[in-house]
Image: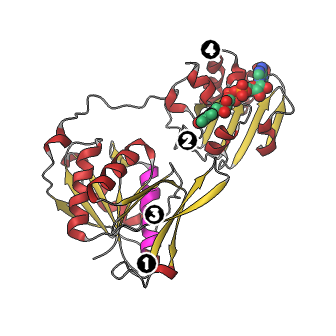
Amino acid sequence: MSGILVYALHHDGAFNSNSLGAVSEGARLAGELGTQCHALVLGERAGLPDDLCASLGAYGAAKVFRVEGPEGLAQPVVDAMAKVIGEGGHDYALFGGGLLGFEIGAGLSARLDAGVCMEVTNVRVDERSGDEDAGRGRGRLVAERPILQDSQVSDVHYASRVGVIIGRLNAFEVKQADGAGDAAVEDVAVEFAPHSLRATMVTRGEQRGAEVNIEDADILVAGGRGLGKAEGFQQLEELAGVLGGAVAATRAVVDAGWFSYSAQIGQTGKTVSPKLYLAAGISGAIQHKVGMQGSENIVAINKDANAPIFEFSDLGIVGDLNKIVPKLTEAVKARKGG
Ligand SMILES: Cc1cc2nc3c(=O)[nH]c(=O)nc-3n(C[C@H](O)[C@H](O)[C@H](O)COP(=O)(O)OP(=O)(O)OC[C@H]3O[C@@H](n4cnc5c(N)ncnc54)[C@H](O)[C@@H]3O)c2cc1C
């Protein structure tokens, strides 16, 4: 059969929201193509109980292929997806983005000689080309990828039998499928290539400035060079703490070693879309903007009234962040009764 196979990354008994978004997107596209969306999960058997795997049905996965193997590494997933696609005849492999998705997608593309497009922000069905390609369902997928610093969008068509689509981080909305029940769970035994097992997971953790995962945080307090020094981030940590959010950063401060690289937002960092993005001491360069412009509400604090960030902020505060941020923290604390 044809279909879409999505890789779902899990950790500590939960799927990450980026993967759930990819499953939701896969299900939407499969519906339009008249085919099915399947998911593949890989890890220690004990960490992948039936109910966890079946829960992907709520996001539209008709079936979940469960593979026992070392968790969190790219090559074993490449082996597993290549086997499932080889036997199942899936037309597309879809990933939600992130470093692991990029690595698996690239490996799978090489293994299957499949076309690959990454940093995809939207996928649509191109009905016109459907008839030319028997066996692919009613139409073919076209991946939309922003280019030239997100000022243009290119359409990517796949000429290969299998197409690999790698989304931009959090580009696909997490959506529960209407009336969907549990997904069927099928165990698949995969013999991993010797080279796939040469890497081992030594330790696993989040290298974050706060306890909260920045891609999943509803509130982000981001700092830039206007903080003046690495210690400037302490006041942002405090504000993020009282707001229940996480701290993010620009490339300028990450390059300066003031904050963790994993918190960098922008063209060469992460793409986020929180409910609130509070930018302190950030000028609003295009390379930063592309990573946070999807935020629901943008609030900027900058001492320069002409800073570009005010052009795309919902609320702008002109002033010294060193005075405003502590006052804001106190105000939030007072409001929360603490
Ligand atoms: C290929 C390429 C890729 C890039 N990728 C990224 C990326 O992924 N992410 C990214 O962020 N950047 C990226 N950049 C860098 C980007 O172009 C900018 O240089 C960077 O975003 C600027 O960071 P900033 O806003 O912290 O610093 P600045 O541009 O120096 O801005 C600092 C701001 O702080 C304000 N300020 C100073 N003191 C105070 C104060 N006391 N109170 C309030 N405001 C104050 C200033 O008015 C100024 O607007 C990339 C660049 C290139 C060329």
Identify the mark at residue 24; answer none if there is no mark. Answer: 3
| CB at disc 1 and ligand 1 closer than 8 Å | no
Residue 135 % position (x, y): 33, 80
Does the segment drawn in magenta span residue 173? no
Question: Reading the chain from its start, which is encountered first: label 3 or label 1?
Answer: 3
Residue 297 % position (x, y): 71, 46
* Quadrant of the image occupied by residue 22: bottom left
Stretch of the chain drawn in magenta:
17-30
Residue 198 % position (x, y): 18, 36
Which of 160 and 255 lies nearest the eye of the viewer?
A: 160
Quadrant of the frame with the C terminus: top right
Residue 63 % position (x, y): 29, 67
* Residue 270 as seen in the image, left or right of residue 27: right
* Quadrant of the image occupied by residue 1: bottom left
Categorize mark 3 by other alpha carbons within 10 Å: few (<14), some (14-19), many (20+).
many
Does the segment drawn in magenta span residue 29? yes
Q: Tell me the distance, in whole angstroms, between the alpha carbons under discs 1 and 2.
A: 33 Å
Question: Reading the chain from its start, which is encountered first: label 4 or label 1?
Answer: 1
Q: Tell me the distance, in whole angstroms, between the alpha carbons under discs 3 and 1.
A: 14 Å
Identify the mark at residue 33; answer none if there is no mark. Answer: 1
Q: Amino acid at mark 2?
A: Ala
